[in-house]
Image (cartoon, coloured by chain):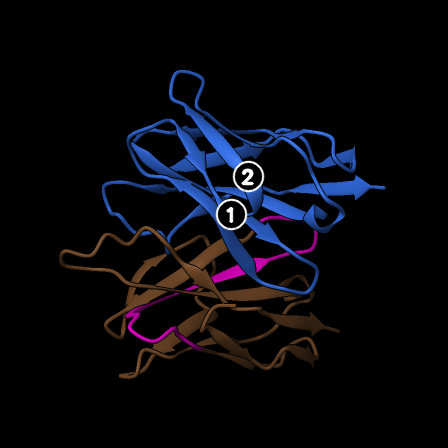
Chain colours: A brown, B blue
Amino acid sequence: ETGVTQSPTHLIKTRGQQVTLRCSSQSGHNTVSWYQQALGQGPQFIFQYYREEENGRGNFPPRFSGLQFPNYSSELNVNALELDDSALYLCASSLYGGSFMNTEAFFGQGTRLTVV
Amino acid sequence: AQSVTQLDSQVPVFEEAPVELRCNYSSSVSVYLFWYVQYPNQGLQLLLKYLSGSTLVKGINGFEAEFNKSQTSFHLRKPSVHISDTAEYFCAVSETFNTNAGKSTFGDGTTLTVKP
């Protein structure tokens, strides 16, 4: 079991609403990445946060936004929810930068978001 | 940009039989390669990774994978599977230049079902 925790585990929202998902990274890690995993598909990279700044973004619209806090925990915010946003949202924690070879990411158990 | 193709969406196999899960990738730059396992309602767990050196990589739970640069493949194998190996398996790549495992491109997964 990794030290990455996500909350909540399940969430049901109505189309058009906004949602915030949370992730606590593993101790000693400074980078958090967020992925969307639709049913029957592999995880798709949304964005990554490093030192409280966005450090790369996948092909997702601006209504997907995030934050990273000084303790390296992170939030994923999604505005104007659409039915297609229904998915498992995964957070991955890793160590990046300087002399560190960031060659392993540790995943949380995910938040299952259902948009109705 | 990279892409990952997992050639089999479902692989049924009998207990104690050998198994191979196939993964091909495409990339214009050098990549690191990973295999992850996902059990129902859980996050991803790293099985093994190829960074450099020997092309045969051994991982947890008796799995191994072979990197073939000329064929751009990274197939996962296990000589004898158990019922507990039933899960979803994902192949992933990330750029070596950026050395950032948090930014990975995943395949769509292979469902391994081990039958008694």
Q: Which residues are magenta?
A: A24-42
Residue at the limit of the structure toward the top, as seen here:
B70
Taking the spot 58% from the left edge, 75% from the top edge, the residue there is A80
Q: Residues within 10 Å of mark 1 (few under 14, many from 20)?
A: few
Mark 1 residue element: helix
Residue A88 % position (x, y):
62, 64
The disc at residue B63 is 2
The subunit letter for the residue under badge 1 reads B
Q: Are marks 2 and 1 in contact (CB under 8 Å)?
A: yes
- Of residue A74 and residue A25, the one placed in the foreground of this image is A25
As shown in the figure, which amino acid type bears the numbered disc 1?
Ile
Give the CA separation, mark 2 to mark 1: 6 Å
Residue under the image location 20 percent in, 57 percent down: A100
Residue matched to label 1: B60
Height in image: B37 above or below B77? below
Residue A73: numbered disc: none
Which amino acid is tagged 2?
Phe
Image position of A68 with respect to A86: above or below: below
Q: Position of residue A48 (x, y in %)?
A: 36, 63
Residue at left 48%, top 43%? B59
Occupied quadrant, residue A13: bottom right
- Chain under callout 2: B
Residue B97 located within the stretch drawn in magenta: no
Residue at screen point 57% across, 47% down? B61
